[in-house]
Image (spheres, coloured by chain):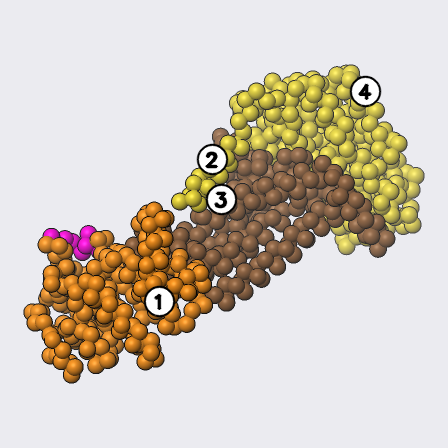
Amino acid sequence: MTEILRYSDLRKSVHGRLLFDIEVLAIHDRTCVALSGKNGAGKSTLLRIIAGLEAPDSATVSYAGQDLSWRRAARKMRGNAIYLHQNPYLFDCSVTDNIAYGLRRRGMPLREISVKVSEALEWAGIGHLQMRNARELSGGERQRVAFARARILSPRILLLDEPTSSMDSESRAQAFRMIKLLKDEGVSIIVATHEYHTLAHLCDDHLLLQAGGLQSQPPGPQGSERKIIPYS
Amino acid sequence: MKRFIANLLYLTALLLTVPALAGEPALVRMATTTSTDNSGLFDVIQPVFEKELDIRVHVIAVGTGRALELGRRGDVDVVLVHAKAAEEAFVQAGYGLQRHEIMYNDFVIVGPPADPAGVRGMSDAGKAFGKIAGASAIFVSRGDDSGTHKKEKAIWQQADIRPEGDWYRQVGQGMGKTLQIAGELNGYTLVDRGTWLAYRAKSPLQLVVSGGGELRNPYGIIAVNPERFPDVNHAAVQRLIDWFKSDGAHALISGYTVDGEQLFYPVTQ
Amino acid sequence: MDSLSAATAESFRLLFSGDADLWIIIFTSFSVSVKAILFAVPLAFVVAFLMAHLRYPGRRAMIAGFSAMQSIPAVVVGLTVYLVFSRSGPLGDLKLLFTQTSMVIGQALLALPMLVALSHAAFQAADRRVWETSVTLGARPVRAFMTLIHEIRFGLIAAFIAGFGRIIAEVGCSMMVGGNILGYTRNIPTAIALETTKGEFAQAIALGMVLLMLALMLNGMLAFFQGRGVMSS
């Protein structure tokens, strides 16, 4: 297990008020970390900062052993640390075009894209939907498209913002399955949630964002093998 | 990306349509009055002088006041209007080189068939205006400082009458519109013969007064002063002015008829 | 109403006889207005997007400003452009007055406030997640912008159509800066104005019918796209 990314002194204020000030946050590959906290604690904000979608007030970033300013790191993060909204937005086009979106932006040749998209469709089990307009799909189907669309870019980090909040148990189980698959493929996953107990079996670690600070929590009730990673 | 290129190409094409007229006939812009343009004379003479002189003329037809303003601002190369006093002032002030009187037509007074002011058959415009004012018969004025309007004001002034009252309507419109309105209101109005001839079939009004000296309407053509606006196409303008004085032009002008009647009389030097 | 029906019959004849003068006028109208709208649209989209997504001082004033500018009468825009491009004016050396180019510029300026106001509404109503999804999937800002435009395309098409409708029928600006020159800067609305003053109603009606059909078509398309826009959001 290797460290991908490390943030030090990560500060963020919103409307003049300090939201959080995190001494250290290290992200390792092949792990799944649950991030919990009350509404408004800043979970989404933290995920978006990691994804490079929002800027912190200040932070020191160490990426692949190199110290970088946040701005440089953010540029590297786009496409590498992919953020999924609570209800992911699918573009108004076919499922195939949605999944191919990131690869097309990278300028990959069409034949290659086509191969990868087929593989992604199979992975998510949505081959039968490839020509359908993404807007017409059910909630569960959309979730699969969103995951496939992110996964196809081989991201190192996936940031899931409360992925199962408004889901029925079947969709939830499906989501967990995909998260497990992704984790086994080596992706680092951070899941913001306020239903930790439902995910505990998946997660190697549990961080609590509270009162502007990040604390690691004792293992959840499912108490699976927990790797001890020092956070402070 | 495709969109950006399309836009770029489009912009280039747009810029290329800006005058790039090397090798094309010289362009002359002329401001004239709406009544002159509407008389149809230019439909006959324009193709001829454009061909003979190898020039292209863009005719911008507006009111007299605006035509002279265009000349003052250098937006046209030559003006052709029929408002002698204003033209002379234009030249005096240095905006134009010289006034050349090239032709004249005349004004007539038209009115309702019932002729409430009893002016039918008169030729003295001033006296006719006096009777119209006396009878408080509806009179429709151009009210737009055009050549026609200036002529009308001059006649009132000569007759020493100030037209005021509900019967005197100033519409601020072109000649055709004014005639329409006069027709609708059953009123009198002053109109140049050219517009009248083109219109009389459609109008309920009738010609009631004509022939008097003050009703004469001389046309002057003036080249815009090239010292003020050096890029005015002065050589071409000069040739155009000379053309108007030529025998060929005179023949065309006197030969031009509307509804069977001659409209313009060239001024032969 | 005898003359009205006679004029209308005559106007049909004119339209279908392929009268060259008439069709040059129609072509000029489209040529000028299409160029103007194509010119104004990309600019309007970018401005509207920035207004919707950036926070900067005076932003609210700018939004209100564009909205208010929609009410500027065409003839006032025409007068302003005329004064600028007149030989005596600041940009007189460009010799653009009384050309189709100045008409294009005038009409583009005329359409701009409406295009900005309407597309701003579309951008404002856009799902915030669109931009973020594009960016997180690796799209650069220009690409993400294109994606956003695609996602809200119905609202933007509606803006386009509304803007075009405004300028294809306006006479105040075209007359001022074009000069209504036969065969060159005479478009449908200025020709109608002229033919009406000359009492040539048949011509005016013929042109008016072209404009009317166009207006009906545009409004039909507008209704269609606005409906689609609502449904897909």
Vertical comparison of B13 with C220: above or below: above
Q: Amino acid at mark 3?
A: Phe
Which chain did the renderer colour orange?
A: A
Marks 4 and 1 belong to one chain:
no
Discs 4, 3 touching: Cβ within 8 Å:
no
The tint chain B carries is yellow
Q: State the mark number for residue A125.
A: 1
Asked if residue C187 is among those painted magenta in the image, a careful observer would answer no
Q: Are marks 2 and 4 on the same chain?
A: yes
Q: Is residue B125 left or right of residue A152?
A: right
Real-space CA distance between mark 3 and mark 2, rounded to the nearest whole angstrom: 11 Å
Residue at 54% from the left image edge and 38% from the top image edge: C102
Q: Which chain is brown?
A: C
Observer-side mark, 3 or 1, equals 1
What residue is drawn where x is 69% and y is 25%?
Answer: B221
Which residue is disc 2 drawn over?
B12
- The residue that disc 4 covers is B251
> In the structure shown, which secondary structural element does the residue marked by tag 4 occupy?
helix
